[in-house]
Each structure stands twice: as C-alpha cells, then as structure tokens.
Image (tube, coloured by chain):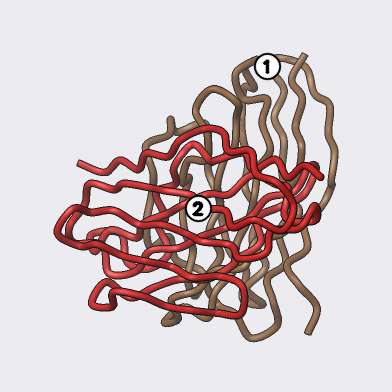
C-alpha cells in the first residue's frame, strides 16, 4: 500500500540542527521529496532524492535515505527562525508516474531563540 | 519564469452549488496535477492532466472533475458541493517527463 508517516511536531533552538524523519511503504517509489509550507502558502519544493542514492546535500539541507528500512530524513543545518514551517515528505509510487505524490501528514517545525 | 498561478485565491460557496477553479502552469510545463489539502485528510492527489488528457486519477468521487486546455491551463470542477469539500486546492505543474512538481499558492474554498 501507499502510506507515508512523519512525526507531527519538532521544536529546535535557533542555530541548532533540525532532523525531520519520515517512513514510507511503497518500495517501488523512484523519487522521494521534501516540501515546505509556510502559513497561507502553497508548497515549496526543497529537495528530492532518487531511490538509488543514500544521501544528497544541498547547502544547509541534507537528505538521507535508507531504502532497506524505507526511512527518509531531512537535516537542516544552522536552523533559523525563517525555517519555521510545516515540512512534508512525499513519495512517488511507480504505479502513479512521477506526478502522483503521496504525502505524509507534515511535521511542524518551530524554531525558538 | 512566472510561477504557477491559481484563481481565485479564495472562494465561498454554499452546499449544493458547483465551483470551478483555474490553474495556469509554468510556461512550457505540460503536466498539471491537482491536490486537496484538509486538516483531517492532509494532502490528497485528485488527478493529473498531460496534453489535455487525464493521465492519473486519485480516489475521489465523480463530483470532482477536471480538464486541460491546449495552452496547458487546467480547470477543476466540483459539483454539488458538500461541507467536507472545504479545503485548500493546490495545483502543481511539471514538464511532464520531469521529476519535480512546482505548486501554486492554492485556492481556499469554504463551503457553507
């Protein structure tokens, strides 16, 4: 089946690293994504990783993928107050092509001084 | 390049009415997907259109329909609105063969 799970809330201090975790169920998923949503806004694509990769780094963002455990994580280095938002993990099952995304419930990241 | 645009941004309707939402994709993008976002169900895929054809469909009743025009602009229609249709409707565009989708700001629909 298709299901993506995330913890709902994470609180970090400004300047620390944040790690948001996600598990997915569909082993056929070719790409996995991280999106950010700020209040009243749409979804902003942060980064994505191909399923045959273990890690991808993009400036302050590091994505780790453990395909055996179907576990995906997003690390944000030097977290800033502007990073406060909801972060969604998403998978793209092979059956749906690239454009049918299955999203997790989202992790609300709160950054405090 | 201009991003994905959606109109209107906010809409209030009453039960039983119908509504049409519009989405203009990023220039050159031929695929448009629609998602519904609610507090209870989260983000759910509605359907995807590519070159004026529905390429993929989620698990929604037939009251939800869509179409795509030759310029890749897309509309979705919800007939016989129910209270539970109140949601943020997001549209996303991609190049069709690409792996990344870019989302618009959404249309917030309130059904009274």
Check the image and report above or below for A112 versus A51. above
Image colour assigned to chain B: brown
Point out residue B41 in the picture as x, y percentages from the top left corner.
Answer: 49, 28
Please, what secondary structure does the residue beneath circle 2 have?
strand
Image check: A16 left or right of B55? right
Return the residue nearer the eye: A82 or B84.
A82
Subunit that carries the residue with mark 1: B
Q: Residue at x 78, y 63 (%)?
A: B5
Q: Residues within 10 Å of mark 2 (few under 14, many from 20)?
A: some
Query: Viewed as shown, does residue B48 lie left or right of A9?
Result: left
Q: Nearer the viewer, residue B109 or A41?
A: A41
The residue positioned 56% from the left and 65% from the top of the image is: B32
Q: Which residue is mark 1?
A: B16
Residue located 43% across and 60% down the image:
B54
Estimate the spatial distance between the alpha carbons at disc 2 and disc 1, rounded to whole Å.
Answer: 45 Å
Q: Quadrant of the C terminus of chain B?
A: top right
Q: Residue at x 46, y 71 (%)?
A: A48
Query: Can you tell which quarter of the image residue A73 is in?
Result: bottom left
Residue under label 2, please give it.
A19
Circle 1 residues within 10 Å: few <14, some 14–19, many ≥20: some
Q: Chain of mark 2?
A: A
Marks 2 and 1 share the same chain: no
Helix, strand or loop for disc 1:
loop
* Along the line of sight, the residue nearer the viewer: A65 or B82: A65
The chain coloured red in the image? A
């Amino acid at each position: 089946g298709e299901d993506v799970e995330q913890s709902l809330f994470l609180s970090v201090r400004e300047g620390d690293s944040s790690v948001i975790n996600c598990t997915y169920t569909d082993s056929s998923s070719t790409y996995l994504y991280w999106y950010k949503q700020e209040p009243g806004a749409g979804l902003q694509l942060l980064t994505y990783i191909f399923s045959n990769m273990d890690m991808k780094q993009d400036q302050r963002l590091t994505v780790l993928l453990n395909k055996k455990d179907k576990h995906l994580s997003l690390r944000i280095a030097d977290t800033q107050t502007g990073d406060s938002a909801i972060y969604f993990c998403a998978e793209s099952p092979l059956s749906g092509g690239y454009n049918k995304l299955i999203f997790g419930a989202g992790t609300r990241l709160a950054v405090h001084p | 390049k201009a991003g994905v645009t959606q109109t209107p941004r906010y809409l209030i309707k009453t039960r039983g009415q119908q509504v049409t939402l519009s989405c203009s994709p990023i220039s050159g993008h031929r695929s448009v997907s629609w998602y519904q976002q609610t507090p209870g169900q989260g983000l759910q895929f509605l359907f995807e259109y590519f070159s004026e054809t529905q390429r993929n469909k989620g698990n929604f009743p037939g009251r939800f329909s869509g179409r795509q025009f030759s310029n890749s602009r897309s509309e979705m229609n919800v007939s016989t609105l129910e209270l539970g249709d109140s949601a943020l409707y997001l549209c996303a565009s991609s190049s069709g063969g690409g792996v990344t989708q870019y989302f618009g700001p959404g249309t917030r629909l309130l059904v009274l």
